[in-house]
Amino acid sequence: MPRCHYTKLYPAKDLPDKRQPRRRSSSRFGSVIPLPAFPPGAEFLDIVFAVARGTVDKTFQDPKVNPSFYDLPSGMSQQDVPPHVLRLFIKGSSNPKDIEVRGKFEPLELTKLVYSKRRPSDRRQEPEGPSLGREVGTDEVTDMLPLAVDTTDGGVCPDIVGFYCRLETADIDTDFLTIAADLTIQTYIAQLTAEMGFAPAAPVATRYRKFFMNLDLETNPALLEERKDEGLIAPEVYDTRYLAITHLFDVLRHRVQMRWTAATTGAHPPTPAQFGLPDIYLQAYTELMSKVQFDVARSYLSVDVGGSIDLNFVEEAFEMFANGELRTQLPSLYWTTQPSSSFYLYFAEFAFLALECFKTAGSKISSEESVFWEKVLSCLIRTQEIYFRVYCPPSTAPLKFTDYRACNYSPLDAYACSEKHSLRVRYESLPLAGDRINTLALRMSRNLLNAMPGGV
């Protein structure tokens, strides 16, 4: 077992309290990251976030306006640097206490800090510009030796990091450190696939992890792009699916915002007509992604592979997923197979959309898919309550959509089996009033308002 040095960032009495984050970011998807002392000889610092869960915003404010941001020269090369990694040249620089990094698309979840230096064979010209004020592309540094990796305890959010676990070459073998220092999406997919391949086949948790892993592989644009580059999916399949996913992402976000707004005014949930009838593109994209998700479910949530989907498997899989029971850590220290953010709401919102599109004349959504979405809708809305408790952010302020992140995971708040059963019973006894879909829509609106009084 490799040894680990625990590096405290504050005196014990000053360690941040989970209920009182140390310093909040000023931006929508920002993260304030405390930095420990740089290890001797380090030339580069890679700030690594959860792979494929958002991208680092490369457009930073001028440090003269806000010193906590870093001014990255315009046009700086980012060739081959993954979108979830911020690489800084730190040789000879002062050691700041923290850095504020902004993200796009999703809240950033810190995975690790990787310190490295160039190997003797790669001693090129020193990068120009301010040392810690510029970002470096791997076209400038092709062969680096990892010196140390700082990781948090279980994916703790940057706002509440009180210490890091430091892995160094003096304490562990170089191979282990190299694996822990890995940054690429390609290796993430390989490790996740291997992890599922070597997992015991019998436990249902393995089946469910494989379901969510493959659902991510088929619907996450960053992972789809990597699979296209490896020749695992055709370029035209990637292009079509990328357009569908990005368009649906905007539509689902707008629908959730409308649902929350209606809830705040005490109005009934928006009707399909108020959402707007799907145009030809939305109809086609919904049909495509309905089939993609249905096929993945049929592959992993059926008693017989490719047979009828077992609803009990679906219910248990989403309960365990929302409850954090499926989360897995890979050798490269990434946590996976867990909800990444409030995008968990989009499962239910897509089900609503698929059912609406099914009723459109000429819809290509099969009756089998329609029955599936109608049956699982209650589960997708019910498990929102589990997610909102287990991944509740450490803040006393009115919570918002962007506050819910994977790094908020709290095992002490996880639902017990008896609680999950009680929740099922409560939803099964909801008054249907002749329209089950409307009743569930009202329940989702209440979930949104209860969990996100600060806004969506």
Image: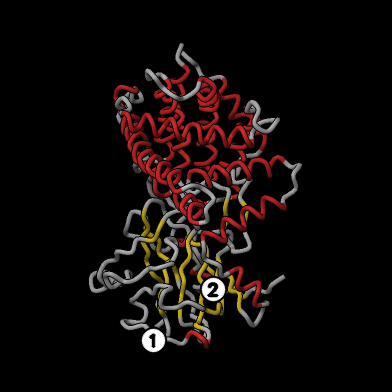
Determine if residue 18 is in view. Answer: no
Task: Label 2: state its secondary structure.
Answer: strand
Q: Is residue 10 left or right of residue 100?
A: right
Q: What is the three-letter code of the residue carrying label 1?
A: Glu
Task: Give the x, y percent position of residue 108.
Answer: 43, 57
* Quadrant of the rendering where the N terminus is positioned: bottom right
Q: What is the three-letter code of the residue carrying label 2?
A: Lys
Residue at the location (43% across, 32% down)? 349
Q: Is residue 118 left or right of residue 179?
A: left
Task: Give the x, y percent position of residue 404.
Answer: 45, 48
Task: Give the x, y percent position of residue 104.
Answer: 36, 55
Residue at the location (60% across, 27% down)? 424
The residue most toward the top is 434
What residue is disc 2 on? 8
Q: Earlier in the sequence, mark 2 or mark 1?
A: 2
On residue 126, the disc is: 1
